[in-house]
Image (spheres, rainbow, N blue to C red):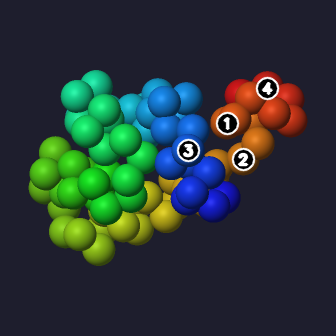
Amino acid sequence: MNWDRIEGEWKRLSGRAKEQWGKLTDDDLTVVAGKRDQLAGRIQQRYGVAREEAEKQIAAWQAGANDAWFGKGGKD
């Protein structure tokens, strides 16, 4: 999934991000606003992981994104 699409639909997808990274607050997700580098920084901060690990987690989450996440192609 293209990150530009995730960023453009961030309000819709922020709930999925919160499911993935439960330590992120609603304020964190608002500040992130779909910006990948901001998300990595917040994951680093909340989970105490290195930047590389945060990026790895984001890449795995992004790889799991599909049309159902955007309300297309069937059930969420």
Q: Are marks 1 and 2 in contact (CB under 8 Å)?
A: yes
Q: Nearer the viewer, residue 31 or 22?
A: 31
Residue drawn at 23 percent across, 28 percent down: 27
Which of marks 1 and 4 precedes in the sequence?
Answer: 1
Report crowding for label 3: few under 14, some 14 to 19, many 20 or more residues within 10 A (C-alpha).
few
State how far apart marks 4 and 3 are (Cα): 21 Å
Up-down: is 3 above or below 70? below
Residue 47 visible to the viewer: no
Residue drawn at 30 percent across, 68 percent down: 53
Q: Are marks 1 and 3 in contact (CB under 8 Å)?
A: no
- Between disc 4 and disc 3, the foreground one is 3
Residue drawn at 76 percent across, 42 percent down: 67
Which of marks 3 and 4 precedes in the sequence?
Answer: 3
Q: Which mark is residue 8?
A: 3
Q: Are marks 4 and 2 in contact (CB under 8 Å)?
A: no
Q: Which residue is mark 4?
A: 75
State how far apart marks 4 and 1 are (Cα): 9 Å
Q: Which residue is mark 1?
A: 69
